[in-house]
Image (cartoon, coloured by chain):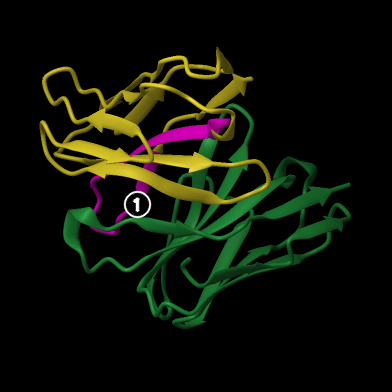
Amino acid sequence: DAGITQSPRHKVTETGTPVTLRCHQTENHRYMYWYRQDPGHGLRLIHYSYGVKDTDKGEVSDGYSVSRSKTEDFLLTLESATSSQTSVYFCAINGGTGGRNTEAFFGQGTRLTVV
Amino acid sequence: GDSVTQMEGPVTLSEEAFLTINCTYTATGYPSLFWYVQYPGEGLQLLLKATKADDKGSNKGFEATYRKETTSFHLEKGSVQVSDSAVYFCALTIDSNYQLIWGAGTKLIIKP
């Protein structure tokens, strides 16, 4: 199994509070991604990183920010949580060195509830 | 833009039945295609993949063939088991940053 850990695994927070989710990898992979999973929507990309301090927005980035200060850690921050951000969040990593054959590995997910 | 469409679920089958989950895609370039599986309470894991036309990906008895002429990558298994109950996602990647474009997922329920 790929070494990828998300924390926390579950969190309940109040509307308007900041929340930070952490993704930690031990694979030294270059690419890291944050997705959210909601019923009927599959997975939607929030932000991704293609190197230390190099990040870019995905299709649903509003209300989220990310940081990657070292290869192994990718943080997702909800600046002011809203109920629409209640979701399951997945981190993924990709080595990006195998060309078109490269696969992504996923963490176990973080279930976030905003009340 | 690029997109993936897969059949809606849930799909309910009896054990040992034949499975097909349809997946079609639109892409401006030449994508790699993937099937991922998500077991209850877990993250996603790669089931199989194909990177060029007519390639067949296979794993754990599942197969899918990259059909460029019909832009499809249908998932099949000859005899399903209760343990195959999960959500199956079709996805493609075409971007140099290896971003995945996802289908909505198909929940598969296998009854003994």
Residue name at image x 46 percent, y 50 percent = B45
Residue name at image x 82 percent, y 49 percent = A114
Spot occupied by residue B106 in the image (x, y as percentages of width and height): 51, 25
Numbered-mark total: 1
Spot occupied by residue A25 in the image (x, y as percentages of width and height): 50, 75
Disc 1 residue type (three-letter): Gln
User: In this rendering, would B112 be left or right of A71?
Assistant: right
Residue at the disc numbered 1: B99
Determine whether B76 is above or below B93 in the image: above
Residue name at image x 27 percent, y 66 percent = A96
Quadrant of res A94? bottom left
Q: Residues within 10 Å of mark 1 (few under 14, many from 20)?
A: some
Quadrant of res B33? top left
| Viewer can see residue A61 | no
- Give the residue furthest to the bottom: A70
Spot occupied by residue A112 in the image (x, y as percentages of width and height): 76, 52
Q: Which chain is yellow?
A: B
User: In this rendering, would B39 be left or right of B47?
Assistant: right
Local secondary structure at mark 1: loop
| Viewer can see residue A37 | yes
Q: Nearer the viewer, residue A8 or B55?
A: B55
Q: Nearer the viewer, residue B40 or A63?
A: B40
Residue name at image x 77 percent, y 65 percent = A18
Quadrant of res A31? bottom left
Q: Is residue B86 magenta?
A: yes
Chain for mark 1? B
Q: Is residue A75 magenta?
A: no
Q: Which chain is green?
A: A
Segment tinted magenta in the rendering: B84-101
Spot occupied by residue A84 in the image (x, y as percentages of width and height): 73, 41
